[in-house]
Amino acid sequence: MSKDFATSIVQTLRQHGFQAYLAGGCVRDLLLKREPADYDVATSATPTQVMNIFPETYAVGAQFGVVLIPFPIASSATPVLSSAEAGGGESSAVEVATFRSDLGYSDGRHPDEVRFSKDPREDVARRDFTINGMMLDPVTEEVLDFVGGRKDLESRIVRAIGDPEQRVAEDKLRMLRAVRFAARFNFAIDAGTQAAIQQLAHELHAVSRERVRDELTKMLTEGHARRAFLLLDENGLLKEILPEISAMKGVEQPPEFHPEGDVFVHTLLLLDNLPDPCPPTLAWGALLHDVGKPATFRRAPDRIRFDGHVDVGVKIAEDICERLRFSNHDAEQVLALVDNHMRFGHVTRMKESTLKKFLRMPHFDEHLALHRADSLASHRNLATYELIREKLTEIPPEKMRPAGLVTGNDLIAAGYEPGPRFREILEAVEDAQLEGRLLSSDAAMEFVKREFPN
């Protein structure tokens, strides 16, 4: 998104007699010399007035004074998403919001009523944190700072605007946002704001599960996940939203395999070793890969064991994905990551057919990235990782996933009765083909008749 486009909106609004400024996170990012993912404009114009000035406007929250103005390259037939709706990626529209004050927050998330204003001070007073409460004149570069945001940026502090307890009570999601900003920028959370979060942490359940999931996903993928989860734990939020991760604390591991420490320590170290950028499913799979260990901890005569922790972990991860309303597609991949992460230890003993099937799993790049991070967070031995990379280079696609030599129709033509046995036969043929023992359809049918007499 271009700053020039957002500036042109500000100028157009001013030409029509309205106040207008860049506002919120984009001002913070510009002052930090970062490229904003999106640009927001605050104005004294009402939503109706904005829509009259900009015919291509999309009203996405007019009752709260919010409309979207699409970037010119966007097709008018294509819905335009804000950065929040797009999952935090770069926006294709500028969000224009009318100066307002918010009245009451009965549900602990949304204002009961908004009152439009002509005063930018009123608008800033209802925002969340001082670092997000500044406005910028993009023409003169003058910063309007009524809340000390610039000083807090310099001091590297996340501080609630006004009374911290009131700010947090108004919108419980702000507790997670405070942690996310502190982790992303490596800032401290102001003592008063932190006290309010710790006092109200148990009320986080008022926030929709989807919004909690989205905030956690941003924490996991913005490159500072370890610090984010330490802050969640420190402020009493982790046990409220992910008690299964909190349960990892203090769960010992065998030092010969995990010299780094307990399951919680290992998991957070693993998050530090994820690629950047990191796919959300990989990040969640990494967070949950050992979630079954606390429930399966056992101190055996020879060493600490976690018998069956993968199966238990898949079930727990499934519950978490359902609770946080993951899409079926994303949940399936997260569960696959948890389910398969221990298979890397068997790679050197796998049959050729088993190895090829393993390497051609959907999104195998995520499985391999998880294995690498898992290894770096424990024994730091990347021999298996390097071996697999060599195999992926050496084995051509047609050998990894060859065209079948025998079909169900071929079996029927040979007199076999359709049924569950077909799957067993076809899998046996494919395994022999992947191992190089069958090279033609005729040889495959001879193999079938020999190994599976009709």
Image: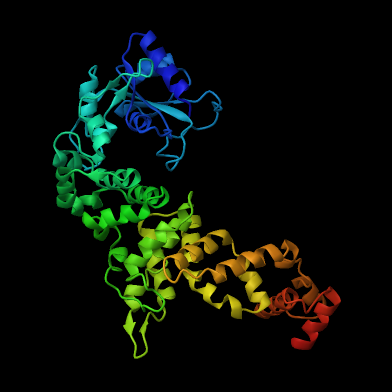
State the image coordinates of residue 276 (x, y, percent, origin top left): 48, 50
Total label count? Answer: 0
Q: Please report the residue visible at 31 percent of the width from the left and 28 percent of the height from the top.
A: 63
Residue 396 against residue 408 in the figure, above or below: above
> Going by the image, does 212 lie left or right of 165?
right
Q: Please report the residue visible at 48 percent of the width from the left and 26 percent of the height from the top.
A: 2
Q: Is residue 84 visible?
A: yes
Query: 14 or 229: nearer the eye?
Result: 229
Colouring mode (rainbow / by chain / secondary structure / one colour): rainbow
> Going by the image, does 380 lie left or right of 212?
right
Residue 401 against residue 185 in the figure, above or below: below
State the image coordinates of residue 326 (x, y, percent, origin top left): 42, 55
Q: Quadrant of the C terminus?
A: bottom right
State the image coordinates of residue 347 (x, y, percent, origin top left): 58, 75
Q: Please report the residue visible at 84 percent of the width from the left and 74 percent of the height from the top.
A: 440
> Going by the image, does 189 lie left or right of 398?
left
> Going by the image, does 449 lie left or right of 348?
right
Q: Please report the residue visible at 45 percent of the width from the left and 24 percent of the height from the top.
A: 3
State the image coordinates of residue 389 (x, y, percent, origin top left): 62, 64
Q: Is residue 360 visible?
A: no
Residue 66 against residue 441 in the figure, above or below: above
